Image (cartoon, rainbow, N blue to C red):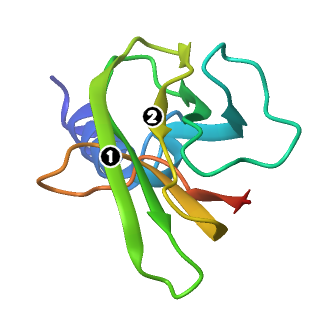
Amino acid sequence: MPKKYKGMLGIFLIFFLSFPSISATSDLERVTISDSSLKNDFSSPIVDNINTYQQIQISTDIKNNQEKSQDFVYLVQIKDSKDAVVSLGWISGELAPEHTLNPSLSWTPNEAGEFTAEIFVWEDLKSMVALGENTTLQIHVS
């Protein structure tokens, strides 16, 4: 290879390796979390108040924004009005490339009050690396 091309190759490699790929996504952009909702046992949206001992589903759309499969943990933490955790649940799975999934977890409140469901999508429980921005839902139980 002529000497002038070796120098150009070096410059190209330095330039190429110095800048991340335009298609790369950050950790928090790997998955989009949207359309969180409360549903009844028949997967219909809950429009009325929730009663104590009524089982509900906390459902969310999660979309893999990558061109590769992504392992995930869908985690829902429910806190009462005093910020105490009253329920914690999760499911794990794998999202196909550019695929949307609608996981849900059930919860049955055993007392009336105001609650907040915090919804997370992580890579796994061990590393706790968030794949997308978490979201919350307010829950009123009568």
Query: Alpha carbon of mark 1 to alpha carbon of mark 2: how far?
Result: 7 Å
Q: Relative to 60, is 131 on the left or the right?
A: left
| Residue nearest the observer in this picture, 20 or 34 | 34
Circle 2 residue: 105
The picture quadrant where one finds residue 139 is: bottom right
Which image quadrant: the N terminus?
top left
Circle 1 residue: 89
| Residue nearest the observer in this picture, 126 or 48 | 48
Question: Label 2 near label 1: C-beta < 8 Å?
Answer: yes
Residue 4 in percent (x, y) is at 28, 38
Residue 115 in percent (x, y) is at 61, 67
Please tell me which of labels 1 and 2 falls first in the chain: 1
Question: Which secondary structure, mark 2?
Answer: strand
**At 30% from the left edge and 52% from the top edge, which residue is drawn?**
14
Disc marking residue 99: none
**At 45% from the left edge and 34% from the top edge, which residue is drawn?**
105
Which amino acid lies under the numbered mark 2 shown in the image of this protein? Leu
